[in-house]
Image (spheres, rainbow, N blue to C red):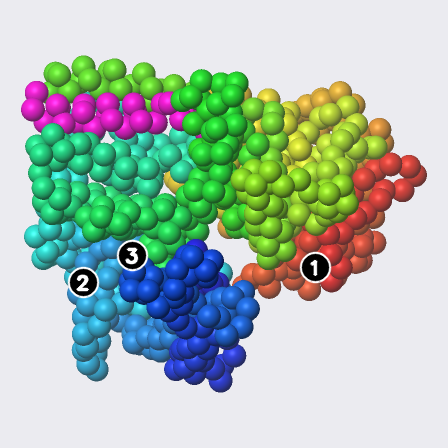
Amino acid sequence: MLPAAAAAFALGLLGSGAAPGWLAPWMAFAAGLVLLGAGWLAAGRERRGPGALARAGLVAPEHEVVEAVGGRRVVPSITPIVAAAISLAGVLTLGVGWGTFHDRGLEEALLASLAPERVVLGGSLKTDPKETTFGWSAVALAQRVEWPDGAATLRSSIWISGSDEMPGARRGDRVRLEGTLRVPDDERFAEALRHKGIPAQLQLQTLTRLGPSSSSFISATQSVRRIVGRSIEGVFPRKEAGLLLGLLLGDDSQLDPGLERDFRASGLSHLLVVSGGNVAMVLAPVLAATTLLRLPRWPKFAVGFGAVAFFTILTGAEPSVLRAGVMACLALVGMLAGRPRTTASILSAAVLGLLVLDPWLARSVGFQLSVTATAGMVALASPLAEHFGRFAPGPIAAAAGATISAQLGVTPVLLYHFHEVPLATLPANLAAFPLVAPSLLLGAVAAGTGLIWFPLGRLVAAIALLPMRWLELVADHLGKAPLGYLTAEGGLLVLVGGTALVAGIVVWVRTGWKPSRTLIAAAIASMPFFVWASALGTGPPEGLTVRFFDVGQGDAALLTTPEGAAVLVDGGPERDQVATELSALAIKRLDIVVASHPHADHIVGLPSVLARLPVGLLLQPGCEGEPSPLQADLDRAIADEGVEVQNPRAGDTFWLESLRLDVLSPHRCWTGTESDANNDAIVIRATYEGDVVLIASEPEEPAQEWLVGSGVDLRADILKVPHHGAATSIPEFFEAVRADAAVVSVGENDYGHPTAFTLDALAASGSQVWRTDRQGTITVVFAGPDPTVKFERWG
């Protein structure tokens, strides 16, 4: 019942957001307690009855020996399954009540009600400040707030963001914060904060570090972290130091961006931060030392518990470490009491306890992945290892069993949240398995010896670099392996269906049950509901095919030909969305990538694309302008992946078999215009066997006037409208193009895109207008006399 109860409570927390407004938390609590009581009564009561000997007629039932050893037996009131179902319904209802209680508390939070006041907050940092595209951000625990009309004490998390230099304060430090409270206008961001239990955002003006944590225990972990971190930075090269800081201390602030992309592309991103496995690596030698010292049970328990608590706080109490830490402590309690429990019951108790203490963990993707990976290993690791042990050495069989079982556990959650799972994950994790422990342990030894004698630390670090760099090679090469991705559209159907499939595999492996042919046929027939149809039906197109991806307020277009040429123009404003779209289409290589200009809505997604796919050539304007962190990130990705770069100008032509790409703009780098970067944007005219597509990224009036006046052939069958349909185009440009159809790549925005002026000018030029905010991804296939158009949705 314990695993079922933990799952029911988690589902109740997740479903609390859909609770009707009239449902007060106390009502859910009362209903839950009533159901639990009903389940207890339905389970029956114990009665003393005759033992087996008396029931067999071998002794008299009233014999004193029989009375002494006669057991109690439960006489159920109704079917046990019904009693269990009633009890679980009670636990689920309690979860709904607990989640509703915290949701309502967040809605009525003082910090949210004070927005947009300017306030002074006193508290401590919960996370390290982390660099973002336009500054930095962190999470703080506010314990006091002052505003012009009053002050109050409280205990609430707050998201802080600053636009100046990164502060010197670190996780656990006491701080004084001054700034303006805001409830984010972006609903997606606001929802993400609510799921973390954060009611508001503080737009920071000043941050003052008041000192280390007031808790001596936390302060000690801060000191250890600082000392060990400096040693790691001293004895290791920068890239490996950043990797080890994440592995050992949970500090990802110095993680190399290219390395992070490689690990993410190969399915090894869980290795970049402290995980539950690190708790075992710390606890095992500690318990071994207590055994060698022959410590009694109570001191051994105290040392083990203290080591787990210290490591958990040292690494920032990441969800996976919390889960593993609580499991370790429960296991120690069982050993201390002389009543050890199964791993399944310990996992369930840990999950249930943590969700009661912190209900926001139910919505933490890290916590969900940690729990499902562990559950997968509990259910399948041993039987799979036993099966593989028939034809593979024991260590390899154990590694394969652990890797496959964990991957099966997390796959439904990954498809639900991220819509993809790299098929390179299994071989990558198998290859990485023997490298992780040596990297971590040798790295820790190098850091420790470096504190005592620096030259010896450097020597041990040189040895540790061997497994660490092999690990980097595994991530780099398998991240680009032509194995494709398992992709899905996400949603509840994928989560429920995937979980049911994994449950069926567990039953099959553990019991030997074999599904009927009808069930197998039904499972195969249901695959299109879970896997993107584009992934099932990929292959060479019949003619030139252009996909204008729905990336919101941004641009991304893919051109493919029957000969296999693939060209990507821009990567949209989301980090991984376009890379996921390409995975769903089974794109294995890009011949040319065009980064039209260094604006977020066009290039944020390109570094992930470069990390996943081999790219033949990258085109970008190469014009000097204001320093752009986005362009710097793209430049790092280009260097990391060794991609050739060219800065084309008007008149340059590129051939990919029968596909001709003519660069129409820019003819020079613009200066003195309202937006030099937009006017510098690359404009591509793609021609394939007489079919023409003009991808006019973002040129504004000056660049368009030059294009019209230059006499270059602008005619096209399909036009990608410049600048999301903003009022920065001239009617003469649309008249010169005379496209049959014009695609506006646009999303929800505050700029009024597309403007009525631009839509009227397009209509006057004879173009039919299609919009990604209404039609979704728009696919145009040039096969036959007229192009075929497919809309993702109608709107």
Q: Quadrant of the N terminus?
A: bottom left
Residue 752 lies left or right of residue 471; in this view the side is right
* 48 inside magenta stretch: no
Across and down, in percent, residue 613 comes to 57, 28
Which residue has dot 3 on it?
139
Question: In the image, is residue 183 above or below residue 470?
Answer: below
So how many labels did they put on this image?
3
Magenta stretch: give its range.
428-453
Cα distance in 3D space between marks 3 and 1: 36 Å
Q: Residue at x 69, y 38 (%)?
A: 535
Cα distance in 3D space between marks 1 and 2: 45 Å
Residue 211 at least partly seen: no
Residue 42 lies left or right of residue 175; in this view the side is right
Which of pointers 1 and 2 indicates the residue nearer the eye? Answer: 2
Q: Nearer the viewer, residue 795 or 385?
A: 385
Which residue has dot 2 on it?
123
Q: Which mark is residue 774?
A: 1
Across and down, in percent, residue 308 comes to 21, 44
Q: Main secondary structure of the magenta part?
A: helix
Q: Secondary structure at mark 3?
A: strand
- Pointer 3 with pointer 1, Cβ within 8 A: no
- Pointer 3 with pointer 2, Cβ within 8 A: no
Q: Quadrant of the C terminus?
A: bottom right
Q: Tag 2: Cα neighbours inside 10 Å, few (<14), some, or many (≥20)? A: many
Which of pointers 3 and 1 indicates the residue nearer the eye? Answer: 3
Question: In the image, is residue 241 above or below residue 513?
Answer: above
Q: Secondary structure at mark 1?
A: helix
Q: Residue at x 18, y 70 (%)?
A: 144
